[in-house]
Amino acid sequence: MRAAIVSDIHGNRRAFQAVLADLRQVAPDLVVQGGDLAYCGTHPAEIIDQIHALGWPGVRGNTDEMLWAPEGLAEFAATTPKLGPLLDLLQEMILSTLAFEREIAYRRNNRKTMNLERLNRITIEADKCGGRPCIRGQRIRVTDVLELLGAGASIEEILVDYPFLEREDILAALDYAAYQTDHVVLPAS
């Protein structure tokens, strides 16, 4: 039995996509996530949702624990007063990161609108189309499909013009675009 452990993703979508591509090639029998999924990256909710959709069992890492139970920092600070200033700084950073919880709750409540499994149809390869997102490793970019839809082409028309595409490919392009634009924007202070 071949197993893979994926941990310390920290909301880094590009690195996570590279790991997913590697896992598709290696094809382990079991994948377990080792925590620290969200904190510090720009796409924490997306990473958590993708891992949830993949059904990987796992554990909560220390940064996950800080996000889901930030009161633990106050308890720790009470037992270790010398770390108080550092923990105060961490608490400030955590508060800005907690904004993504609303996004996670929204996505979990509206899961029917986006199909995370369908996103696996979107591939990114450095040697294809300049590393831009493509449909199933083919040389048709997500942006090509979106531009056709934006110009008024129907899904049926696109399928006739591009017979190697499937309806799910076009829906995957729309899902991908939705994920690319659906994130919390925190203003710089």
Image (cartoon, rainbow, N blue to C red):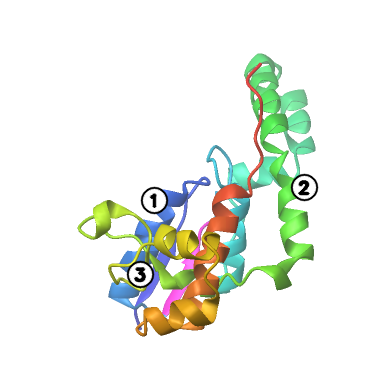
Residue 102 shows which numbered tag?
A: 2
What SS does tag 1 mark?
helix
**Res 74 quadrant in image:** top right
Number of other residues with Cα within 10 Å of mark 1, as a class: few under 14, some 14 to 19, many 20 or more: few
Label 2 is placed on what type of residue? Arg
For marks 1 and 2, give the CA distance: 24 Å
Pinpoint residue 162: horizontal percent, then vertical percent.
Answer: 37, 79
Pinpoint residue 156: horizontal percent, then vertical percent.
Answer: 52, 82
Relative to 28, 8 lies left or right: right
Chain part drawn in magenta: 30-34
Residue 137 shows which numbered tag?
A: none
Pinpoint residue 133: horizontal percent, then vertical percent.
Answer: 38, 59
Label 1 is placed on what type of residue? Ala
Counting residues from the start of the chain, the first of labels 2 and 3 encountered is 3
Q: Quick one: 147 or 152, which is closer to the camera?
A: 152
Label 3 is placed on what type of residue? Leu
Residue 23 shows which numbered tag?
A: 3
Judge whether residue 47 can be spotted in this image: no
Relative to 11, 113 lies left or right: right
Going 70% across and 24% down the picture, which residue do you hit? 92
Judge whether residue 64 can be spotted in this image: yes
The relative height of residue 180 versus residue 49 in the rendered view (above or below) is: above
Residue 15 shows which numbered tag?
A: 1
**Res 96 quadrant in image:** top right
Counting residues from the start of the chain, the first of labels 3 and 1 encountered is 1
Going 62% across and 19% down the picture, which residue do you hit? 86
